[in-house]
């Protein structure tokens, strides 16, 4: 297990500081806020653009709306499953259409961000599943010297989640471009807040310790918390799928 974590640490460092990995999977995110009184026009125009340009698997976009926190009301457009070759694609027609037909009704928040999918942290992921209705988004800024501890907790708690939350899914991304270094985001996806999960006689802590050793839950959680930057190390938001902006 120690060797595995050291390997994950090396992989994360190389993805953060190296050139773009040609074999990796990338995700793009974009954030927009509708101008005052123009939300319906924004949704209508963005829906037309999405159906026109973003229905194919290699250029798919799914949109969620942030419902909690200081970013509430922001639309987060997520473009998953990208390859390095995709960034060489000529998107000038698509970008012009967006600028001419959608941006009159919206404001861009922060610009494009490019992420690398950390598949070692996947939990209950089935790429053929339709987009989930809800997301819990956790944003982490990790100390450069503590990435190993962050990764250990993320990987291990995911193993526990896999059994205890079979109707939920999790992916984790690391930021490649468009923000602060050592930034990670996890999306926990589900379709119902009042979901029916299996009943267990044990707790999450019990299961964790059973899998990884006596008292590892407390030790790993403490190391995870200490791995985060003090001021803005962790933010959490809730998002809801905007069905009107689905590509099909």
Image (cartoon, rainbow, N blue to C red):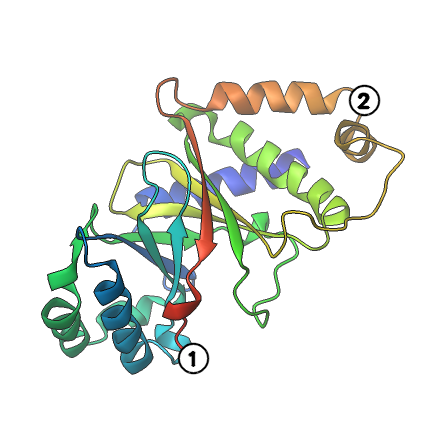
Quadrant containing the N terminus in the rendered view: top right
Which image quadrant for residue 86? bottom left
Q: Residues within 10 Å of mark 2 (few under 14, many from 20)?
A: few
Vertical side of 143 occupied by 50: above or below: below
Distance from the alpha carbon under mark 1 to that under mark 2: 49 Å
Tell me: 85 left or right of 25.
Answer: left
* Residue that sits furthest to the front in the current view: 37
Residue carrying label 1: 248
Which residue is depicted at the point 36% across and 52% down? 115
Q: Earlier in the sequence, mark 1 or mark 2?
A: 2
What secondary structure is found at the residue carrying circle 1?
loop
Percent position of residue 119, x then y = 54, 54
Q: How many marks?
A: 2
Tell me: 58 left or right of 240.
Answer: left
Which residue is depicted at the point 66% across and 37% down? 157
Vertical side of 244 occupied by 20: above or below: above
């Amino acid at each position: 297990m120690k060797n595995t974590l050291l390997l994950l640490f090396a992989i994360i460092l190389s993805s953060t500081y190296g050139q773009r990995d040609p074999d990796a999977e990338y995700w793009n995110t974009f954030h927009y806020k509708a101008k005052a009184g123009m939300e319906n026009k924004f949704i209508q125009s963005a829906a037309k653009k999405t159906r026109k340009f973003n229905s194919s698997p290699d250029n798919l976009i799914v949109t969620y709306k942030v419902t909690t926190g200081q970013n509430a009301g922001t639309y987060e457009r997520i473009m998953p499953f990208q390859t390095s070759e995709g960034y060489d694609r000529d998107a000038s027609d698509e970008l012009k259409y967006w600028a001419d037909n959608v941006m009159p009704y919206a404001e861009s928040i922060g610009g494009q961000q490019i992420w690398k999918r950390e598949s070692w942290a996947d939990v209950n992921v089935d790429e053929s599943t339709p987009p989930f209705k809800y997301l819990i988004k956790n944003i982490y800024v990790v100390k450069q010297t503590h990435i190993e501890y962050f990764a250990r907790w993320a990987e291990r708690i995911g193993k526990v989640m896999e059994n205890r939350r079979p109707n939920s899914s999790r992916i984790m991304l690391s930021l490649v471009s468009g923000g602060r270094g050592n930034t990670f985001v996890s999306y926990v996806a589900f379709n119902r807040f009042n979901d029916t999960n299996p009943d267990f006689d044990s707790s999450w802590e019990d299961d964790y310790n059973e899998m990884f050793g006596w008292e590892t839950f407390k030790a790993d959680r403490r190391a995870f918390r200490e791995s985060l930057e003090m001021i803005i190390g962790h933010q959490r938001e809730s998002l809801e799928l905007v069905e009107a902006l689905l590509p099909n």
